[in-house]
Amino acid sequence: MDKRFRALRIIALFYQVLAWITLVGGVLAGVFAVILGVVSGREGGVSPLVAQIPLLNRAVGLVGGIVVALTVVLGGVIQFVLLYALGEAIHLGLAIERNTRETAQYIRGEPAVASPDK
């Protein structure tokens, strides 16, 4: 059975790759927030460059950095789950279409064609 809807498969893969990039970026941003909190706690305040960035301007000291890091990582995990689920939902729709097509072919009495991905 031939694979159809190549564009949807590419879009689903794009969302799943974007989900992993978001997760890694969220974890790295969390590590950066902890480091920024420790450094700014030693210097006695946030630098003017970082003071303009929302949420990171509250990362003063180790505790502040950890709180900001947990918030950023939690946001990254939520984004990861949503993007990955969107990609899986597209794959689910494609699987339903394929199974429906195979069932219709079976009901019509047509010979089964070997699938390349099985």
Image (cartoon, rainbow, N blue to C red):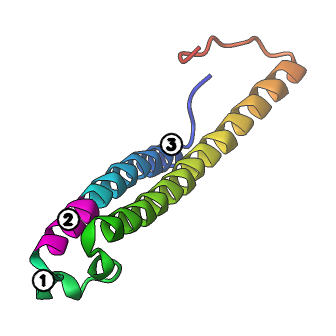
Q: Is residue 50 above or below residue 35?
A: below
Measure the alpha-carbon separation of dots 3 and 1: 45 Å
- The residue lying at 26 percent from left, 71 percent from top is 61
Measure the alpha-carbon separation of dots 2 and 3: 44 Å
Earlier sequence position, callout 1 versus callout 2: 2
Earlier sequence position, callout 3 versus callout 1: 3
Reading the image, the residue beneath label 1 is 47
**84 or 78: which is nearer to us?**
78
Q: Are marks 2 and 3 in contact (CB under 8 Å)?
A: no
Q: Position of residue 105 (x, y in %)?
A: 80, 24
Reading the image, the residue beneath label 3 is 9
- The residue lying at 59 percent from left, 49 percent from top is 85
The disc placed on residue 38 is: 2
Q: Give the magenta-colored segment's residue range.
A: 32-42
Measure the alpha-carbon separation of dots 1 and 2: 13 Å
The type of residue carrying mark 1 is Ser
What type of secondary structure mainly makes up the magenta span? helix
113 vs 56, left or right, is: right
96 vs 29, left or right, is: right
102 vs 15, left or right, is: right
Q: Position of residue 108 (x, y in %)?
A: 87, 22
Q: Secondary structure at mark 1?
A: loop
84 vs 32, left or right, is: right
